[in-house]
Structures are given as structure tokens and as C-alpha cells.
Image (cartoon, rainbow, N blue to C red):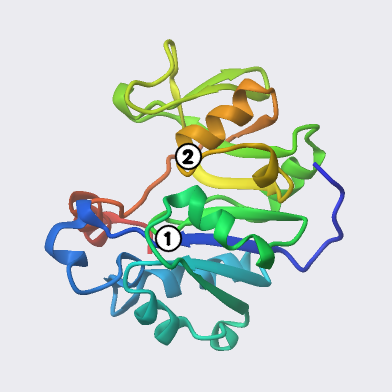
Amino acid sequence: MVASTEPPMTLVVLAGGRGTRMGAYARTTAKALLPVDGEPFLVRALRRYRAGGVTDVVLCTGHHAAQVQEVIGDGSALGLRVTHSAEPEPLGPIGALRHARPLLPETYLLTYCDVVPTIDVRSFTAAARASDCPAVMAVGTAPTPPEANVLLSGQQVSSYAKSPPPPGATHCDRGLLALERRLLDRHPGRTEADFYGALARRGELGAVRIGAPGADIGTAHRYERYLRTGEK
């Protein structure tokens, strides 16, 4: 990747979805703010990212954006510098990222508001900086065949697709990437499948393999399971 100085380390969090798979849980509450042990999930996640070296955060919001801004504010209570980018209308995950482009540094990390932060951010960032690719994705073995969306070729993602997955795929993305800002100008699309798929086809998407299993609260079932058994 393009060489960048050590900290500040900027993390972009996509948090604009309507949470339709959350059922009643996200009807009146932003998915990112669903409670875990009495505090919003996003607060817990940001605290962990801060411990991993993140100093700056860009929150891409949409649905219930005002709730997120009220709870997180400028991030100072968490030891972070937080900037909010509220999409004016539903733009899709990559569309929301494009909308936030003026706030992005030359290189940045990208994650989602429902991903449990179990990956060592410093180790992942070091591996991404050592890669020859302008984009790097954390990948792991898919828990089930339908969840596979990544086909690997050595240390690169050779194909990325959802519904259906790439033929022969056995891995999935783990919800953490390192990206160069200029890629938003070179590749079209508002969805992950369009954007990551284009990166993969051009040989621009590297892979960092993560051995430990991942977790997220992206559905009502997964949220309930995390409340029962998830890492706290």
C-alpha cells in the first residue's frame, strides 16, 4: 500500500443501514447502538479499536444518524477524534463511503458497525502496509458454504461475490479492510460486491488470513447469540 506515517490511524465505520435483519430490535434504535451489558455496542467496539491503536474515526451514518451522533459525539469521551458523515439518502455501503470521501486520509481502515472487533488491528495494519496491493481484506474460513464470498489465490483475493459466491470459494471477508482513498475514483459501484469485485478482478485486493473465528450482530439471531455467548 501507499506508505503512510504511523499514527494517526483512521478507521471508517459504515453505520448507515436500516438493520432490516434485526427485526424489532432496530425498529426505533440504530443497530450500532443496540445494548450489550448496558452500553451501546458501538461504544464497546470503538473502545476496543482505540486500544488497538486507532486515533481517528469517520462514522458513515444514515438511518437514525442523529441517535449515533448524540451518543458518540466527537469521540473525546473515548479518547478518539470522531467525525460524522450522514448520507442524505440511502446510498449503499460504498456509496456512503464515497459521500465521506472529503473526510478520508490517503489510506484508512474500513469496518462495519455490527462487526465484533476481534482482529488485532496493529498486526493487520502492518500486514496491509507490507502488501503490494492498494486494498487489503481480512479473510477467514467461511463458517458455512453459503457464507463464502472470497476466492483466494495466494495472498490475493481473486474473486469476490455474494449470492452466489465465486465457484470454489471457501473463505469469507472478516469485515476489516485497508484501502487507499484513490480507489474510490477508479472503481464504480455502491455495493461491496461491485467495489470489492472490481478490485479483485484487477488484482488490487490483497488478503490477510485470520485464523480465529469472526462474529457479528448483523441479524436478530446473531445479536441474541452474542448476548448469550459472545466475547465480552
Name, please, the residue furthest toward the front: 88
Query: Residue 115, image x and y in percent?
Result: 42, 54
| Left or right side of 26 for 167 | right
Task: Please tell me in which quadrant of the rendered image residue 170 appears.
Answer: top left
Q: Which mark is residue 156?
A: none
- At a point 28% along the width and 70% down the height, the residue shown is 34
Which of these two is toward me, 162 or 155? 162
Q: What's the residue type where badge 1 is placed?
A: Cys
- At a point 58% along the width and 68% down the height, the residue shown is 58
Q: Secondary structure at mark 2?
A: helix
Which of these two is toward me, 12 or 143? 12
Gap between marks 1 and 2, in whole Å?
15 Å
Q: What's the residue type where badge 2 is placed?
A: Glu
In primary-sequence order, the first of circles 1 and 2 is: 1
Quarter of the image containing the N terminus? top right
Residue identifier under label 1: 113
Position of residue 156 relative to residue 97, above or below, is above
Q: Which mark is residue 192?
A: 2
Which of these two is toward me, 85 or 30? 85
Residue 210 can be seen, yes or no: no
Q: Secondary structure at mark 1?
A: loop
Disc 1 vs disc 2: which is toward the camera? 2
